[in-house]
Image (spheres, coloured by chain):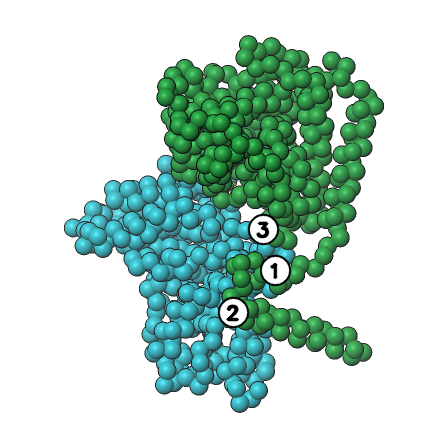
Chain colours: A green, B cyan
Amino acid sequence: MPRNPTHRPAHPREHPLAPGDLLPRDEPVRLLDETGASHADERYGMPPKARLLEGYRALVLGRRLNDQCTALVRQGRLAVYPSSHGQEACQVAAAMALGEGDWMFPTYRDVVAIASRGVPPAEALVLLRGDWHSGYDPARYGVAPQATPLATQLLHAVGYAHAAKLRGESTVVLAMSGDGATSEGDFHEALNFAAVFHLPVVFFVQNNGYAISVPLARQTAAPSLAHKAIGYGMPGQRVDGNDLPALLAVLDEAVERARSGGGPTLVEAHTYRMQAHTNADDDTRYRESEEVQTWVARDPLTRMRALLTSKRWLTQAREHELVAEAEAMAAGLRVAMTDEPEADPEELFRHVYATRPPALQEQWELLADELSRSEASAGSREETP
Amino acid sequence: MTILQDAPPAAAAPAVRETMTMAAALNRALADALAEDDRVVVFGEDVGALGGVFRITDGLRARFGEERCFDTPLAEAGIVGTAVGMAMNGLRPVVEMQFDAFAYPALEQIVSHVAKMGNRTRGAMRLPIVIRVPYGGGIGGVEHHCDSSEAYYAHTPGLTVVSPATPQDAYALLRAAMRHPDPVVFLEPKKLYWAKGEVDTSITAELGRAVVVRPGSDVTLIAYGTSVPTALAAAEAAGAEGRSVGVVDVRTLAPFDDATVTDAVRATGRAVVVAEAPGFASVAAEIAARVGERCFSYLEAPVRRVTGFDVPYAPPKLEHHYLPDVDRILDAIDTLYPDEA
Ligand SMILES: Cc1ncc(C[n+]2csc(CCOP(=O)(O)OP(=O)(O)O)c2C)c(N)n1
Ligand SMILES: [Mg+2]
């Protein structure tokens, strides 16, 4: 990855921002209304046509990926899938806001964001398929391994950004989390470190209203999650998380602030997980289907399609092309998930330490011996009629 | 002086005797304790409307109300830390950690405060807290959902560490844990949640007592949690090969019941400890060492351990290679008879 030296100020700003600069708006930023009609904003401009079309393509692919994965779980090809169905605008915007040398620190729910950033879906799904704990080389894509222990990755993101600053690199780090994770102590520590050291981090909270069954009201009594930013001395902003243009505008601004030495930002996207927490969850135990239906009406894809069609930027032919591309991606994924290589048991021992210690070698030899004996007995069983 | 009042007169829940899963037995233990003792409060992540991701608290909020069974903000240090304060002020908190590895944010509270308060205050302030932790693998879970984290707790003086292997013990030991004056880390083997067995709620159990679950005169297997059924299956298989193999279920990992285990091993002269956690510096290692010290002159062969490998818990596709199974136990038993090799 290219590393561009920058001229970021070595010290935090001399004049801390005034409270008015740190508080988010009372209402989330919106550039599209629920019908997909555009909505002018005094501060955030509509991204250009090419960017919107690129975003729409990623949305179509992302939705298809989510739904293919849900099907793969039902077929037993994935161990588990926490779908971001309904949150694809956030997923896509997270990837699009970053440049080549930047880094993303995702969670278990962010497969679509990871894929949008260029990680091949089959590599992104290694964890959830159960082959290994992570399937891609983080440095190759600028994507940290997906974190399951909540909020822990936010500190890693801050440390990565701190190192980038010390090394004089222009990297911006996007630290992703859900609404529930904001209650963990690590969330607080991460925001505080980022603000105190004035680091190039964008904290991106996808507030989908629930942490499994627990609604947002049990996580915070603050007016919004973005309001927490002021307590750390960084700006916070709220954005409609099903409005891709608004997400791009708000994240672009935050990334630009980080890159130009303006320090961290907390962005809260208001969105909704339209499906259960994972396939193992039963969401009828804690929410009404009417609530889900309200959010189906705010589907991020429908809104973007309406915008692009009304502007005549999206032709039928282009729409068909995108659908075909998504189908091809899904078909490729199905093949990749069907052809199942035998997992290699020696992998268990290979990577624990840089050099395999003798005690682990001994344990591997024990297992290898077991395996060869069971193979031999299976062989002899085959021979006996 | 302790700040706790005497237990209120027990409006004991009517005894039942029926076949149920371990999950149902735990649920019933919580319900019976909530009904009998209004100092008991149950809280954690998703324990309210959802009834817990494993449904162990199913129906408790509806039956006992939001004040007795409630969801907290998503913060394990917060859950355990506030349980400390509640116990200091006369309540008996029972908290749920959602999975083994998600209890780690609470370790500071557990190690530095939960475990030490009684000692620090020379007994003036004991903390009757139960920390329930679903633990262990064998369920095809992805990383951080299958840790056997018992050694971290067992290594911490002041904690009583319990793990049941049957629905009956799940009920009786959890009831005992909730009556205990000191903090208990109650490790629930999640692979056994849906295994069924008979539960008689009038049977009580004492913490700190191991139990011989299968007598045997040639070899003693020592196990706890998920490894108990595996050890029993191995004992059965060894029996078919003509060896009389007994099984001890440790049940309380700390403080350890040396007497029961020592008696059993002295009678056979051969011992294998079975546990799923990595073997290095583990509870199994401690048990093997204690048996070695106490039974040396009775032993026909060195004490063996069959444990997980010293690697991070395997991903779902590889976990069958990682987990101790019947064959691995039988292999270990064979090594106790070098002359027959
Ligand atoms: C430290 C920790 N505690 C508990 C869990 C179990 N858990 C997994 S996801 C989840 C809910 C997270 O909610 P949120 O942060 O809102 O993200 P979402 O799943 O909605 O995307 C919980 C409690 C965990 N992974 N890590
Ligand atoms: Mg959420």
Q: Amino acid at mark 2?
A: Pro
Given residues B231 and B145, the one toward you in this image is: B145
Given residues A126 and A21, the one toward you in this image is: A21
Image location of residue B179, percent across then percent down: 31, 54
Disc 3 is placed on an element classified as loop
Disc 2 is placed on an element classified as helix
Q: Inspect this view and state whether residue A216 appears.
A: no
Q: Residues within 10 Å of mark 1 (few under 14, many from 20)?
A: few
**Mark 1 belongs to chain:** A
**Mark 3 belongs to chain:** A
Measuring 39% from the left and 57% from the top, which residue is drawn there? B152
* Quadrant assignment, res A142: top right
**For the view shown, which residue lies furthest in the left direction?**
B1
Mark 3, mark 1: which one is toward the viewer?
A: 1
Label 1: which residue? A347
Q: Is residue B207 above or below residue B303?
A: above
Answer with mark 2 or mark 1, whichever residue precedes in sequence.
Answer: 1
Given residues A65 and A252, the one toward you in this image is: A252
Q: Is residue A173 above or below residue B316?
A: above
Answer with mark 2 or mark 3, whichever residue precedes in sequence.
Answer: 3
Disc 1 is placed on an element classified as helix
Disc 2 and disc 1 on one polypeptide chain: yes
- Answer whether labels 3 and 1 touch (C-beta < 8 Å): no
